[in-house]
Image (cartoon, helix red, strand yellow):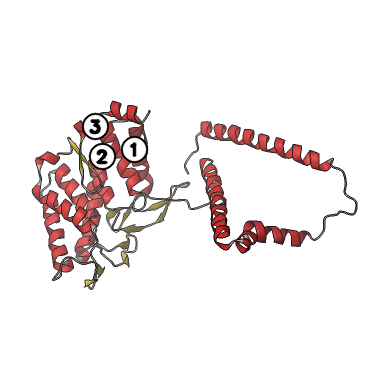
Amino acid sequence: MHSVPIARIAVLVLAGGLSLYLFLARLWKILFQSGHARAVAGYFVSNIGSRIGTFVWEVGLQAKVIRGRPAVGLAHALVFWGFCAFAVITLNHFAGAFGIPFLDRDSLAGAYVDSYYEYIYKTWRLLRDPELKAMWDPSLAAINRYLATTQNGGLWYGMADRVTGKITSTTVTLWDPYLVGLLAYAGDMDHAERSFAAWDTLWRENGLLPMGYDCATDRILNPRYYLNPELIEACYYMICLSKDPKYSADLRQYYSDIKRYCRNGTAYAHVEDVVTKRQSDAMSTFFVAETLKYLYLGFRRDPAYDFDHVVFSTEAHPFVIAHFDPARIRTGLGL
């Protein structure tokens, strides 16, 4: 179980208490004035159920507004419902600070959050901002402590409950190997090598990577391969940072398999099933922009792109570290 810092709880309790006090003070004033208002002869509260139903229908569902002016009313309703949803999410954030979130508690380091982790570290490499490094170091430690799981002899990164830290899902996707390259780039070669070996085994067993895979049950959940670059990218980082020639051999194998199973008379195609190798009539643009680029870089090994001097974006656009002046950037941002 993750411990919640006492200082954080104290600040939240004080802020919440002050906010509640101000709200109740205002509410009490309104109730006091209402309670001492002049009575209206013959008035009494009745049909409570009907009144509640009317409130839900006209306010909650915005029926009266929509009925009166459909287009404008629907737009107004969507904004209102959006604020309601945002209020629930905000409450969940506050509850999470106390270690008791009531919405989705899954935490992961794969698809959907990959850019967050990737750019924390890469921006630190560019700008040397100590705040970014202070975010990255505990994040890396938490990823390896709570998300790493050994299944069927391989090291994988699944999902975990962000309160208890227990693994909740062993489903991985073909986008997740980006983390291998990031681990290697951050100097965690032990986890990078072990995780890469697991992904490499999965590729070789199928000739390509399936889009979804349960590493605990060794079962393909989504058999599609859409020419994705993530394992190719990871292999490039391993080639550059490990100096082990086996990774160059792996890259050649991946390229050979892509040509064998994805190439057609016109271009390269998505594969709808990595088992049957059935192709579809589509090719993602990122195949040219990313997958082929990392293949080229891996085969070319241009010294101009040494990781001590450049930082790659996700799409392998090189940013020269020497061209970034942290002090000037902070001034420009008003920091």
Return the residue at label 3. Answer: 324
Q: Position of residue 42 (x, y in %)?
A: 90, 54
Residue 190 relative to residue 134: left or right: left
Mark positioned earlier in the residue sequence (3 or 2):
2
Q: Residue at x 75, y 59 (%)?
A: 51
Mark 1 element type: helix
Q: Name the mark on residue 186.
A: 2
* Foreground: disc 3 or disc 2: 3
Q: Name the mark on residue 76.
A: none
Question: How far is disc 1 from disc 3 in space, using C-alphas?
Answer: 20 Å
Residues at discs 1 and 2 in contact (Cβ within 8 Å): yes
The three-letter code of the residue at mark 2 reads: Ala
Q: Is residue 246 visible?
A: no
The three-letter code of the residue at mark 1 reads: Trp
Q: Residue at x 18, y 67 (%)?
A: 262
Return the residue at label 1. Answer: 136
Q: Position of residue 18 (x, y in %)?
A: 63, 33
Residue 49 relative to residue 186: left or right: right
Q: Is residue 23 visible?
A: yes
Mark 2 element type: loop
Q: Residue at x 87, y 43 (%)?
A: 38
Q: Residue at x 36, y 57 (%)?
A: 170
Mark positioned earlier in the residue sequence (1 or 3):
1
Mark positioned earlier in the residue sequence (1 or 2):
1
Residues at discs 1 and 3 in contact (Cβ within 8 Å): no
Disc 3 packing (10 Å; few <14; some 14–19; many ≥20): few
Disc 1 packing (10 Å; few <14; some 14–19; many ≥20): many
Q: Is residue 139 above or below residue 67?
A: above
Looking at this view, is 101 or 263 the one in front?
Answer: 263
The three-letter code of the residue at mark 3 reads: Phe
Residue 280 relative to residue 114: left or right: left
